[in-house]
Amino acid sequence: MKKIFLYTMLACMAVSFGSCSDDPMDATEKHVYGENENPYLRTDASATIAYTAEFRKGHVEAKTIRLSDYAETIQTKLGMTVDELMSALESGNAVFYNINPSLGQWNKTAPTKGSTGWYYDNNGLICDQSSEVASVELDKANKALVIDVPENSAAGLSISANVGFAINNGKDYDDYVRFSFTIMVTDPSLIMANVTIPEGDYNTYSVKYADYEHAITTCLGMTVKELNDAVSNTENDIALYMVNADDSWNTTASYNTDAGVIGFWCTKDGTIQNWGSGCLYFVQAVDGSLNIGRYERIASGTTGKVHCVLASKKDPSKYVEFIVNITFA
């Protein structure tokens, strides 16, 4: 009789312990998450889209990630087109939330930026605008995610932010697409040089692009050869802008050196003007180099500074900056 009682107790204990697991994958039926619960994040590397948003200190422009670029992943993982996803968000059949990868769960914190976005602090945690170092927002009208940082952001910022779209089936968010963002602010790679312009009217000194290949590749996203090709025609994507005293770029001036050449005549303080009295130097972006040349009758020993950028017209966050101190022989 004692043996029968003991076996019965052991069997009951086994059943009891076997039903105590908190792991949703261990349960006979998966846990149905309530309105105020953060569902667990089912691991699916193929549903994760990694994107690095690098901003350049002093010249910040929001980054736009168009969902149409990831339409195939959205179709595969959510079973719908981008347009259908936008409609599903409106009807409640899909959701858009933050994801906390360290806890392995979704984060249903209400938006802190508008109705579809969040601000993040230095630790990558959701915050209000007063503590923000970055933000991510869904632009429904343009079907895009927009990443931004404040205009005065300091170099060295680096945080992670994760957001995702999921099918709202009333039980879990197992069918999803996740965007894993690395958001950083970097200091522009300055090309700095001290050069001597050879004596003789209109003689030049060439700052060769090949000597600064790393900066060009890193900041413009192109090879030296591609830059050479880009500056061969004023209609191409690369533009030359002189930098004003307040560090803003003069993006409205027309090139005024040789016809069809990217270049400017400038005064001693870097103001653009047409060739004539008051000019000190000219600067031209040509195949192979940034050429800096002298105006006529410039006295030996005269000094100046050339401050300019070569930048993409389509994406001004891609640029290289030149600060060249010049002495006339």
Image: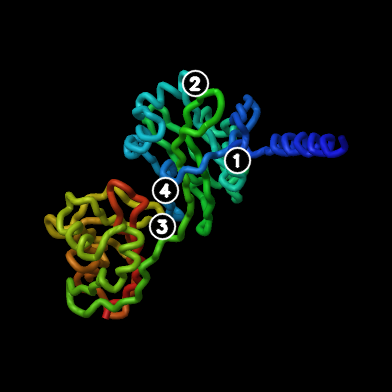
Q: Earlier in the sequence, mark 4 or mark 2?
A: 4
Q: Which residue is mark 3?
A: 245
Where disc 1 sits, the SS reads strand
* Image coordinates for residue 42, horizontal then vertical, percent: 52, 39
Where disc 4 sits, the SS reads strand
Q: Which residue is mark 4?
A: 51
* Image coordinates for residue 277, horizontal then vertical, percent: 22, 62
Structural distance between the alpha carbons of marks 4 and 2: 27 Å
* Image coordinates for residue 202, horizontal then vertical, percent: 17, 71
Q: Earlier in the sequence, mark 1 or mark 2?
A: 2
Q: Which residue is mark 2?
A: 92
**For residue 19, side relative to residue 73 (left or right):** right
Q: Which residue is mark 1?
A: 126
- The amino acid on which the numbered mark 3 sits, given as a three-letter code, is Ala
Closer mark to the observer between disc 2 and disc 3: 2
Closer mark to the observer between disc 4 and disc 2: 2
